[in-house]
Structure formats: C-alpha cells, structure tokens
C-alpha cells in the first residue's frame, strides 16, 4: 500500500480546465480546491474505484474493505478536506468537498470511476455524480440518503471534543474517559479519539480541523442536492438494517434523483457496514 499527497491541481479555464467544472456547477469553487491525500489500496491496472469516508473519519477506515475490493478494482481511498492527512481549509460545504474530489480525479488523470461514499462522503459523492456525471461510471452510497438530517448525538460529540484540554491530555484512553459524560457510546468515544495525535514531544493535537468542521456541521447535515439534480447511471444504496439513516420512506426521494438506483439492506449492520459487516458489504458492492 502506498500513500501520496496530490500536487496542487490546475485552475479551471484555458488548457488546464477540469472537464467536470465547466458544465458541472462547480466553477464558483474552483479557486478553493485543495490537494487531497489518498491511499492506494491495490489493484493497479483494474477499473478505478474511489472511496470517500464519513464525518470525522479518514481513508484509514477503508483499508480492510478497500483491500478486498482491490480484487476487482484499482482502489483509492481519499482523505476529504479537514480530515486525516489532507490539508485544512475554511470551507465545509458539499460543493467544496465535491470540487476537491473532482480536482483530484483530474490530477490523477482518471476516467469515469466507481465512486463509493459513506455518510458525509456519500452526500459528496451524490453531488459529484449529479453535477459531473461523465466522471462517474457507477455510484455506491453507504447508509445515507439525499435529505436533511439533525444529529443531536453529533453535537454532543463535537462539544466533548471542543471541551477537551489538550495541554493536560495523557493519552487517547485519557481522552475517551473525559468524553464519557457527553458521549455514552464506548465505540463512539474510541472513534473520536482516533482523530488525536501526539507530536515527537508528546504534545497532543487534533488531526482534523476541529474549528472548521464544528462550524460546518449544520452544512454537513443538509441535503446537498437541488430538485433538478439527477444521475441516470447505475446506483446502489447500501443501508444498515440496525441504522436509521436510510428509511423506507426515503425510497421516493432516492429514485427522484437516481432513477436507476436500488437499495440493499444489510440486516446485521449499523451505520458502518464496511466495518461492521465487511464481507456482506463487499459482496453488495461487487454484486
């Protein structure tokens, strides 16, 4: 496995124009795109597949499932802006998230790709597919629907992270213990702590851009699609049977934007089927 940082992308217009920007609705955000970090999970020479993580996640979340998908695809897992090892920037709208990914595709000189996005990454993937359909051969959306959400638990998680005194922090386990009053879920406390890292002197910091992501949470909760947005290509929504992110009532809005879509539910999974029920998830992608 290799990890690389993309070089600064060319600007739109002239000889360096992005194919999807001119007619895809991203032109207003071109000056804000940033080079994204990515992991090559194998499968060189096979059709390209690009993985987008969810809120507070990173490309690390995809390493095991991505390696299994590499039996059929050349798999690339990206860190979205303000997450993982990608650069920090002020904006956290879906337009800039999608524009970053589209610019990365151009830098990598990739043709139409299979695009898989989980949760927040799924919303960014939906928007990119609708606005630049020529860049997407197939879309897979993991446990998220094209609608507005309200996540009280996320707000408590962000409050816990912002309250954490990094100057007195001893370890990730110490952070998990301090999160307990606001975040009752032990797996969530461990997940939040994965965004902490220590420097050579033992000083702790947030790897994510916590201020920007905190400010951007209301935007992340919103539906990124407008009534006229649509992608006619093949689409699979993968829902966790123990999750409430995709409901039966969402079928109509899914089909309005993605007329060729189907929905596969993995009964044993919660919100993270690529981690919780990996074999079933990989099978659903490859089917």
Image: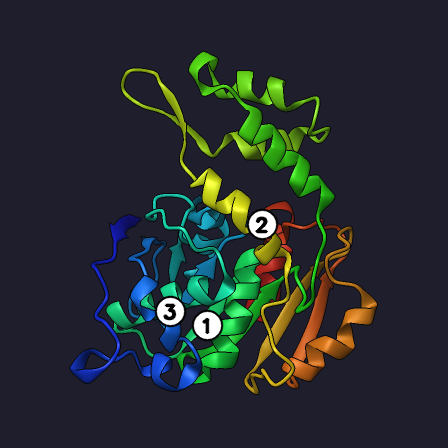
Q: Which residue is mark 1?
A: 114
Binning the other alpha carbons within 10 Å of mark 3 as few (below 14), some (14 to 19) or many (20 upward) gives some
Q: Quadrant of residue 101 in the image?
A: bottom left
Q: Nearer the viewer, mark 1 or mark 2?
A: 2
Q: Pointer 3: what residue? A: 29
Residue 145, x across and y down, in percent: 68, 66
Sequence-wise, which precedes: disc 1 or disc 2?
A: 1
Helix, strand or loop under label 2: helix
- Category of crowding for the residue at label 1, using alpha-carbon neighbours closer than 10 angstroms: few (below 14), some (14–19), many (at least 20): many
**Does residue 65 sit above or below 157 in this rendering?**
below
> Which disc is residue 217 wearing?
2
Q: Quadrant of the C terminus?
A: bottom right
Q: CA distance from mark 1 to mark 2?
A: 27 Å
- Mark 1 or 3, which is nearer the eye? 3
In the rendered view, how is the structure colored?
A: rainbow
The spot of residue 99 in percent (x, y) is: 39, 68
* As drawn, 149 above or below 28: above
Kindly identify the residue that appears in the image at 58 percent across and 52 percent down: 274
Q: For mark 1, give the secondary structure.
A: strand
> Residue at position x 41%, y 47% from top?
82
Q: In 3D space, how far apart are the residues under numbered discs 1 and 3 (Cα atoms)?
A: 23 Å
Q: Say left or right for 57 vs 283.
A: left
Residue 119 seen anywhere in this rendered image of the structure? no
Front in this rendered view, residue 47 or 143: 143
Q: Earlier in the sequence, mark 1 or mark 3?
A: 3
């Amino acid at each position: 496995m290799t990890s690389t940082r993309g070089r600064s992308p060319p600007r739109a217009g002239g000889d360096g124009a992005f194919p999807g920007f001119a007619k895809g609705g991203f032109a207003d955000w071109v000056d804000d795109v940033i080079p994204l970090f990515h992991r090559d999970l194998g499968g060189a020479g096979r059709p390209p597949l690009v993985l987008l993580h969810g809120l507070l996640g990173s490309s690390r979340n995809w390493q095991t499932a991505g390696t299994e998908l590499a039996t059929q695809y050349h798999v690339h897992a990206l860190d979205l802006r303000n997450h993982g090892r990608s650069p920090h920037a002020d904006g956290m709208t879906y337009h800039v998230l999608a524009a970053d990914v589209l610019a990365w595709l151009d830098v990598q000189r990739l043709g139409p790709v299979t695009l898989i996005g989980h949760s927040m990454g799924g919303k960014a993937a939906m928007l990119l597919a609708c606005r630049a359909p020529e860049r997407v051969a197939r879309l897979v959306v993991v446990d998220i629907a094209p609608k507005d959400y309200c996540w009280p638990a996320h707000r408590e998680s962000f409050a816990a992270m912002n309250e954490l005194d990094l100057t007195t922090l001893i370890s990730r386990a110490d952070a998990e213990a301090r999160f307990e009053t606001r975040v009752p879920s032990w797996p969530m406390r461990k997940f939040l702590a994965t965004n902490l890292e220590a420097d050579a002197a033992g000083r702790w910091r947030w790897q994510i851009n916590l201020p920007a992501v905190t400010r951007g949470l209301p935007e992340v909760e919103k539906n990124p699609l407008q009534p006229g947005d649509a992608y006619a290509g093949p689409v699979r929504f993968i829902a966790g049977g123990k999750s409430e992110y995709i409901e039966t009532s969402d079928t109509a809005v899914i089909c309005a934007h993605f007329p060729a879509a189907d929905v596969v539910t993995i009964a044993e999974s919660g919100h993270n089927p690529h981690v919780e029920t990996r074999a079933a998830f990989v099978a659903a992608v490859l089917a």
